[in-house]
Image (cartoon, rainbow, N blue to C red):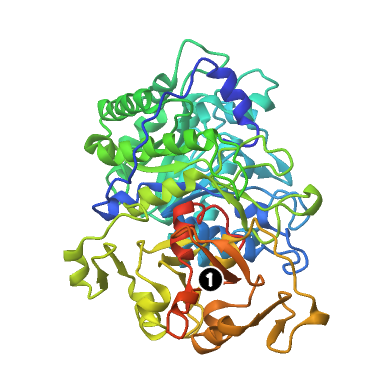
Amino acid sequence: MHFKVGSLVRILFALAVLASVVRTSSAAPLQSPTDKEMFGMVMRDPFYEYNTDPVNYPNATNKTALERQAMELQAAGVKWVRMEFFADYDGSVQAGDINWAKYDWFINELAPKYGLKVLALLNVGMVAWDGHTVRTIAFNDPPDRGDSNPDNGSNHFIRVFTGRAQTIAARYGKAISAYEIINEPNISFDLWVDSRNGGAEIKPERYAALITNAYTAIKNVNSDAEVIVGGLLIGSPPEGQDHDQFDYLFQIYVSQWVDAYRNSDRATRLGWNTVPWDGVAVHPYFLGTTQLFPLLRDFARKLRDRGDHRSKLWITEIGAEAISSGPLEHPNAAEIDQAGYLRSLYGGILADSELHSIIAHTFWFKYEDFVPGNYTHNYGLVRLEEAPYGAGYATSGRVWVHKLAYKVYQELANGYSLTDQVDPVQVQTTNSLYFPETGQAIAPEFATYWQDKGGLGRFGYPISRPVKANGFLSQFFERAVFEYHPENQPPYNVLLRLVGNEYTQDRTFDKADESNVPPDRFYYPLTGHTLGGAFLAYWQNSGGLAIYGYPISEEITEVSPTDGQPYTVQYFERNRFEYHPEAAGTPFEVQLGLLGANILKEDLWWRSNNQ
């Protein structure tokens, strides 16, 4: 799906509706690495992050935004990303060439760093010749015997496409794991526009010639790469209501170009399939799982009926829209519906052994809502921060809000929800610190810090499993949230989340009067607040700035959410102090608030990364 394809899809499938979805309270447990391989995502293409931050990355890729995206994808449990190549006409290279600088860093360095496998979409937007785009309508031109192999069925469009595909495969080698050949060839929005609504179907015979040539070119360079039929939309093209996606696929299988491939030595080479593709992609939008799952089984049977016993189905686009509520608000009804559909989709595939065996990967469309300022497509699992004055996305690439579906995706990919108790027997084999009081164990990354910096008295029990939040491994304790930062040297590789700021982010505290601060209180200009008395003594003697941060309020009277009693309290960046006069003179005169537990209970900890 591209920026405008949704309009065509809606015309073609106006009668289709999302079926009711079943929502469950916990994620399906994952048992093997093949389960994790199911989780793909259509990402924000690196192409669109070139020169978006001209101050820090002039005429270069915005590494900050791309790395933030990679962190968020890894945190969600994504294993595969789908991205597209484009010919360039922005002056950064000769018109019609590919500006490799837009892709090299992400493919060669960033994707491997975050454990992301790349599916490259090779589509009509990369086809250019002599500085000009080759029109999509030329795809359907008959073979012209203009190639060095005049019997390969090619025309000018196919030859240009194949040459560019081979160049990409040669440049990136094993850094690209798979290639998808043409987006939605059976109902092509690009062709629909280029033909002025004259037709949307790339003829199956022409497509068969293209994928046969492209498969050969790519496999000659990298036989390990998988090459798949471009995602087929469900239904019929507007100009031909007498045939559908199954008829289209059948015509590809029986074409003379595929037949010639099957009868050649290529079909017996190591790493090559008996047909000129290794999988078939589908884009089954607007179908509830009660309709979708039988359809996918039918697709798989069609492949086997044609003697193709190796190809699997790839769902390279599927999704549901939801316009989110704000970062300080709980998910709205649209988000709940989107998350429910995502859960029924991935959970249903993982729980069904037949579906699991016939589907290689499932790519959610999409990572982010687009386009900023307009948002015609709200399929994303996140909405990114915008630049001032609606001038596009912020250069930071930071997430403004995670939708509920992001959290559900993460739970499914992990195989557990955050508060699911751990198996104590399994924990014993890893020598982790396990606490039967909460049924949780401290992650090895946090155990030393927890023990050395105050343990149970200062941080409380662990109350969650470890989870990636805001791109960092995190774990909730009763009084704190730990974050693991491997980029820092110990002891700064473990940092405490600013739970005081987070818990009070919708509140405003009166500042202290700097000109009238009592002599027994310290004033902190960074936050405009003071600290004194029992709270100052406790702050100085039990961790200070590193553990609690600066004060962000003055002393106030507040009813405790834990026991419902009024106390004198003061908020700090990382906690809340409570004064207990009944315990004066004892170590319990000042007690810490259970902000970790409070934030976990509010269930908005995952919503935004504006920490």
Q: Is residue 285 visible?
A: yes
x%, y% of residue 224?
A: 36, 55
Q: Is residue 235 left or right of residue 525?
A: left
Q: Is residue 537 above or below residue 248?
A: below
* Observer-nearest of 179 and 164: 179
Q: Is residue 532 left or right of residue 89?
A: left
x%, y% of residue 47?
A: 64, 53
Q: Is residue 345 above or below residue 415?
A: above
Residue at point 63% right, 61% down? 65
Residue at point 64% right, 28% down? 137
Q: Quadrant of the N terminus?
A: top right
Residue at point 48% right, 68% down? 593
The answer to which quarter of the image holds residue 124 is top right
Residue position marked by numbered label 1 in the rendering: 575
* Observer-nearest of 325 and 224: 325
- SS for dot 1: strand
Taking the view exactly as shown, the residue that stands out farthest to the top is 242
Q: Quadrant of the C terminus?
A: bottom right
Q: Is residue 160 left or right of residue 108?
A: right
Q: Is residue 118 visible?
A: no
* Observer-nearest of 508 and 406: 508
Identity, as a three-letter code, of the amino acid under mark 1: Asn
